[in-house]
């Protein structure tokens, strides 16, 4: 029904007595209509005001201000008593600023919520025959020429027996072990188990670790076995990996493993029994994986990491204490050498080094590892030798690198190299690119020809240069040690941490190439 019809029906039959009897009922109805309309409007606004007061007495909300330095509106959150009627505009701006600060902090917290983003690692659950069973049959790892059983070194998560000596400093009591250089695979695996960014979801992993004890497994078959026996375990491993869904995402480019032997031991060129090592790293699947090894070669998928030393700290403070002790160490000898002549090794300069050391009398401290008593196998004996010397000679051994290099750095002794492949082209993630900052290089050719002498070369280093190099060497100590797997360092990155960072960066590079 239309509105004017309602009005007409409302007015009909309702005359009103008035002194103006000749006034029509229409005029009266019109006056009544406007009175009702006015009354309705007043009631509406009263109800609206009451509703407004009721709503804000119980609810929270936002008040919006236009910022003077931004075209966007900003807001402050308030409750019933949060904003006083006398609060100035400046106070309101302060609250806006405070609100913005909380908002930015919230965003940062949200952004940093997953600190492991880009660092997750998934560990393959390999059949036990690729790792655990190798250790259970540790007697097979021991050679007839070994001075002690390899089973002894498996103790303490691969660190070996703890060193106990009545004349040793307190610092030696808890964090020093008779660590075998070939046990790095076990040490590294146990460190991986406590890595803070492990994941059981391989789909979010940035890299995938393969806990295959490649070096220890090969050690069982290096002497007296045919090539098929040396290769069998590696062939079975890559077959197992290729059948896993994790492999197909990047065809192994995101996989990595660790070896306690040099890279060359896994790159046998032929199938002749007389040839050394296995062909594991020449398998197509293996070539896709990255391998961390104590000595790399010219291959782009192998990366050198430090040999394990005898020092495996459990706390940052133990590292700092050792560094400070090495700074204060008295070093009466100019240089020292621990090793044997290696007369059967073609091109070896060890005989010349030993000869010059013996001729230097009080300047050089020599530890002949050919002598009886196995003094070179005693960690305390070796460390005392290096701690007493300013420079430590590090010629090539059976291969270009030596564990002794890292023992000397640990002792604060400046290493002296005779081949760039002994360190400079090796440990790119752990040692400075500017090798002159921490070491001395002597040409082996000039040494043989008598053009240079070790004595005169080292005496030519100024005192300021010597002090600067020693400080750099001591600064490197955290970077070349492996912390105790049963603990975790807080502020220090050790050799393990740097190796993981290097691998993650390498895999990320591959991933970007694949995506692009």
Image (cartoon, grey):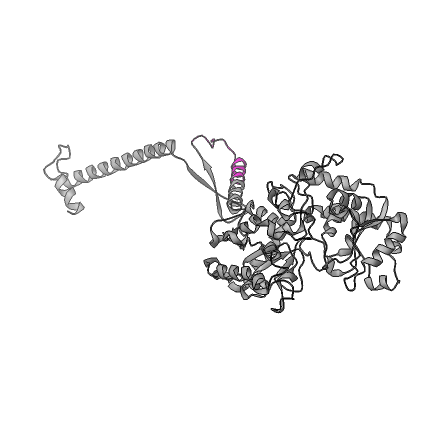
Judging depth in this view, the residue of 61 and 267 nearest the camera is: 267
Residue sitting at x 72%, y 50%: 406
The answer to whether residue 422 is above or below residue 487 is below
Residue 463 vertical placement versus 514 (above, below): above
Residue 373 in percent (x, y) is at 77, 46
In the rendered image, residue 352, in percent from the top left (x then y), is placed at 84, 58
Tell me if 191 is positioned left or right of 466 in this view: left
At a point 87% along the width and 64% down the height, the residue shown is 449
Residue 462: x %, y % from top left:
87, 51
Residue 97 among those drawn in magenta: yes
Please give the range of residues in magenta: 80-98
Of 316 and 450, nearer the camera is: 450
Residue 166 visible, this orientation = yes
Residue 60 figure quarter: top left
Tally of numbered tags:
0
Q: Is residue 119 visible?
A: no
Closest to the observer, 235 or 18: 235
Q: In this image, 297 relative to 13: left or right? A: right
Residue closer to the observer: 515 or 258: 258
Which corner quadrant of the image does residue 502 belong to? bottom right
Residue 412 is one of the magenta-drawn residues: no
Whether residue 473 sits left or right of residue 237 in the image: it is right
Give the side of residue 270 with respect to residue 32, left or right.
Answer: right
From the top left corner, tell me how far across and down residue 426 is, in percent.
69, 58
Which residue shows up at 69% across the image and 39% down it? 163
């Amino acid at each position: 029904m239309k509105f004017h019809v309602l009005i007409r029906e409302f007015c009909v039959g309702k005359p009103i007595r008035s002194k103006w009897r000749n006034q029509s009922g229409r005029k009266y109805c019109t006056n009544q209509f406007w009175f009702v309309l006015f009354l309705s409007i007043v009631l509406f606004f009263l109800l609206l005001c009451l509703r407004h007061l009721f709503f804000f007495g119980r609810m929270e909300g936002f008040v919006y201000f236009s910022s003077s330095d931004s075209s966007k509106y900003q807001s402050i959150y308030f409750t019933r008593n949060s904003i006083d009627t006398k609060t100035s505009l400046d106070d309101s701006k302060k609250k806006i600023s405070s609100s913005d600060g909380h908002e930015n902090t919230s965003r940062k917290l949200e952004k940093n919520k997953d600190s492991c983003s880009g660092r997750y690692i998934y560990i393959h659950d390999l059949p036990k025959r690729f790792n655990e069973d190798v250790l259970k049959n540790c007697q097979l790892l021991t050679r007839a020429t070994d001075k002690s059983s390899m089973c002894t070194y498996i103790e303490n998560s691969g660190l070996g027996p703890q060193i106990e000596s009545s004349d040793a400093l307190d610092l030696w009591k808890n964090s020093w072990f008779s660590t075998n250089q070939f046990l790095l695979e076990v040490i590294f695996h146990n460190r991986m188990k406590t890595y803070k960014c492990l994941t059981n979801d391989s789909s979010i992993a940035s890299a995938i670790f393969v806990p295959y004890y490649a070096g220890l497994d090969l050690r069982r078959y290096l002497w007296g076995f045919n090539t098929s026996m040396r290769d069998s375990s590696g062939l079975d491993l890559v077959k197992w990996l290729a059948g896993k869904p994790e492999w197909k995402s990047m065809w192994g480019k995101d996989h990595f493993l660790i070896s306690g032997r040099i890279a060359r031991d896994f790159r046998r060129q032929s199938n002749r029994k007389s040839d050394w090592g296995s062909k594991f790293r020449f398998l197509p699947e293996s070539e896709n994986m990255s391998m961390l090894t104590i000595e790399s070669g010219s291959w782009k998928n192998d990366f050198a990491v430090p040999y394990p030393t005898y020092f495996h700290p459990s706390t940052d403070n133990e590292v700092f204490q050792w560094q400070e002790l090495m700074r204060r160490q008295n070093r009466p000898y100019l240089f020292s050498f621990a090793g044997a002549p290696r007369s059967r090794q073609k091109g070896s300069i060890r005989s010349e080094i030993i000869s010059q050391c013996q001729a230097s009398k009080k300047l050089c401290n020599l530890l002949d590892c050919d002598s009886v008593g196995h003094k070179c196998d005693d960690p305390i004996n070796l460390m005392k030798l290096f701690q007493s010397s300013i420079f430590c000679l590090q010629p090539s051994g059976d291969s270009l690198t030596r564990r002794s290099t890292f023992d000397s750095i640990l002792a604060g002794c400046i290493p002296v190299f005779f081949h760039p492949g002994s360190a400079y082209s090796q440990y790119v993630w752990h040692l400075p690119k500017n090798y002159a900052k921490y070491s001395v290089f002597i040409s082996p050719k000039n040494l043989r020809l008598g053009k240079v002498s070790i004595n005169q070369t080292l005496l030519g280093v100024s005192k300021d240069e010597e002090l600067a190099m020693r400080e750099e060497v001591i600064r490197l100590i955290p970077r070349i040690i492996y912390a105790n797997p049963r603990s975790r360092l807080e502020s220090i990155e050790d050799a393990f941490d740097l190796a993981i960072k290097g691998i993650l960066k390498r895999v990320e590079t591959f991933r970007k190439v694949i995506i692009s």
